[in-house]
Structure formats: C-alpha cells, structure tokens
Image (cartoon, grey):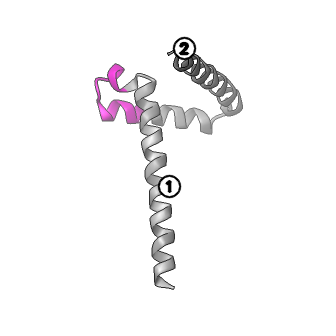
Amino acid sequence: MARTDMREWQVQRRERTRQLIELGGLVVKAGLVELADDDRATLYGAFLTVAAKLRGEDREQALVLWKRKGKRAFEADQGLTNEL
C-alpha cells in the first residue's frame, strides 16, 4: 500500500513540476523576463495586477481578450515552426 501511495505522490509531483516548467516557459516566451530585466519582484507585481483584474468586474472580458491573443500568438508560432 505504501508503495502505491509513493507512486501516486511521485506522479503528482512530476505533473506539478511539468506544469511549473510550462508556465515558466510562457513567461519567457512572452518576453517578460527580458522586459522586466529578470526582476522577480516586477514580474510578481505584474502577475498580481493580472490576478486583481481577474477578480474584478472585467473578468470575463479580460479572459476572452487574453485567450484570443494567446491563441493567435500560438498559431503564429506554429506557422513559423512549420515553415522551418
């Protein structure tokens, strides 16, 4: 039983690690690391601003706009990758 619990824990840990790596990749891909001179306080402040927006009245509008922009950027990147 303990072995199964350990495996579940390891799987969950790997999934979380992968998620964190992917999210960090998005921060880099968006150019935020360079634009903020790799200042973690600046980046965290920006994320807190986004979180506050998502807690506000404009939540749905912001999500629709950001999702549309993100999809277009992913598609543009995909197009560049396919051309290579």
Q: Mark 2 is on which residue type?
A: Glu
Judge left or right: residue 20 versus residue 57: left
The amino acid marked with disc number 1 is Glu
Asked whether 49 falls inside the magenta stretch, the response is no
Q: Residue at point 28% right, 23% down?
A: 37
Mark 2 is surrounded, within 10 Å at the Cα level, by few (under 14), some (14 to 19) or many (20 or more) other residues, namely: few
What is the crowding at mark 1: few (fewer than 14 residues within 10 Å), some, or many (at least 20)? few
Instruction: Provide the residue designation for mark 2.
Output: 83
Q: Is residue 42 left or right of residue 79?
A: left
Cβ–Cβ under 8 Å for marks 2 and 1: no
Cα–Cα span, label 2 and label 1: 31 Å
- Closer to us: 18 or 35: 18
Q: Is residue 42 magenta?
A: yes
Name the residue furthest front: 84
Element on which disc 2 rests: helix
Q: Position of residue 27 (x, y in %)?
A: 43, 31
Indicate the position of residue 64 as horizontal and vertical percent values: 70, 27
What percent of the width, then of the height, locates residue 52?
A: 54, 36
Q: Nearer the viewer, residue 13 or 44?
A: 13
Range covered by the magenta-colored residues: 33-46
> Mark 1 — residue?
15
Task: Say if residue 46 shows up in the picture.
Answer: no
* Residue ID at (41%, 22%): 31
| Residue 24 vertical position relative to residue 32 in the rendered view, above or below | below
Q: Quadrant of residue 67?
A: top right
Q: Nearer the viewer, residue 73 or 35?
A: 73
Q: Position of residue 59 (x, y in %)?
A: 66, 33
